[in-house]
Amino acid sequence: MNQTNEGSLKLLQDIKEMLLGGILLLTGGLLVIAGFVAALAMGDAFFIFFLLGGLLLLFCGGLHLWHGWIAHEVVEHQGETPNTEP
């Protein structure tokens, strides 16, 4: 596999990590909100369950998002212009 395809695949993997992180963050936030609603409606047992699950998902989502954000390095090679012709 040449270096151009390898860089593209790494970029796609980083984008996948960021999307997964965003989905986990949204799910965790919804669970925390559901926990507050459940606490108002039913009691504290559901609040603790939803709060712990939501905070765990928020933490995991933040880690995935951060990993996807910082993992990719842009490397420029001097003298290489792949899409231009002399």
Image (tube, grey):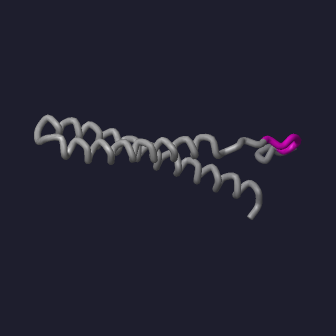
In which quadrant is the C terminus drawn? top right
In x, y percent, where is residue 2?
76, 61
Residue positioned 40% across, 46% down in the render: 23
> Of residues 85 and 80, which is closer to you in this image?
80
Residue that lies at the very extreme toward the bottom in this rendered image: 1
In which quadrant is the N terminus drawn? bottom right
3 lies above or below 71:
below
Determine whether, in the image, residue 22 is placed left or right of residue 66: left
Determine whether, in the image, residue 55 is placed left or right of residue 74: left
Instruction: State yes or no: residue 78 in magenta.
Output: yes
> Of residues 48 and 57, which is closer to you in this image?
48
Instruction: Locate residue 66: give its quadrant.
Output: top right
Q: Main secondary structure of the magenta part?
A: loop
In x, y percent, where is residue 46?
20, 46
Residue positioned 45% across, 47% down in the render: 60
Instruction: State yes or no: residue 79 in magenta.
Output: yes
In x, y percent, where is residue 70?
63, 41
Determine whether, in the image, residue 74 is placed left or right of residue 79: left
Determine whether, in the image, residue 49 is placed left or right of residue 70: left
Q: Which residues are magenta?
A: 76-80
Residue positioned 23% across, 40% down in the render: 35
